[in-house]
Image: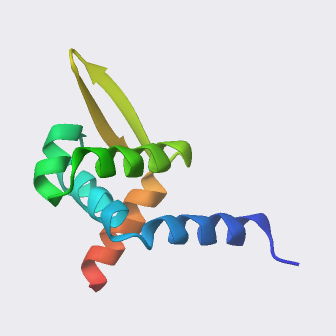
Amino acid sequence: MINSKIINVSEVLKLLSNPIRLGILYQLEHEEMCSCNMLEELISVSQPALSQHLKILKAHKILTSEKRGQHIFYKISSPETKKLIISLREIF
């Protein structure tokens, strides 16, 4: 029987297998916190596509968001995810 930790890791890796989501996390690891507009510009993706991927990452508790005025800023929510992104950046 597979334990829950392995299942959780598998789910995170599935989320990271999408290049747009991985790009979002790479940018957030590097910039710490970014607005949707900043991310749109940095990873060269349309706003609707970016919003869909941000929604997925938030739903899986990979990201958190904070509203500041008219802008929403995103950041990586867990130290484990941040460590994983740093490791991926170092390896590849």
Residue 18 horizontal/vertical position (percent):
40, 69
Does residue 42 sit above or below 65 in this rendering? below
Left or right, 66 with reference to 63: left
Res. 25 in view: yes
**Depth order, front residue of 69/49:** 49
Does residue 83 sit above or below 59 in this rendering? below
**Depth order, front residue of 73/32:** 73
**Depth order, front residue of 55/32:** 55
Does residue 5 sit above or below 48 in this rendering? below
Residue 54 horizontal/vertical position (percent):
38, 46
How many numbered marks appear? 0
Picture residue at 26% right of the left edge, 75% below the top: 89
Looking at this view, name the residue that lies furthest to the right: 1
Picture residue at 24% right of the left edge, 41% below the top: 33
**Depth order, front residue of 24/81:** 24
Left or right, 37 with reference to 29: left
Left or right, 87 with reference to 60: left
**Which quarter shows the N terminus?**
bottom right
Left or right, 65 with reference to 61: left
Q: Specify the quadrant of the image occupied by residue 91.
A: bottom left
**Which quarter shows the C terminus?**
bottom left
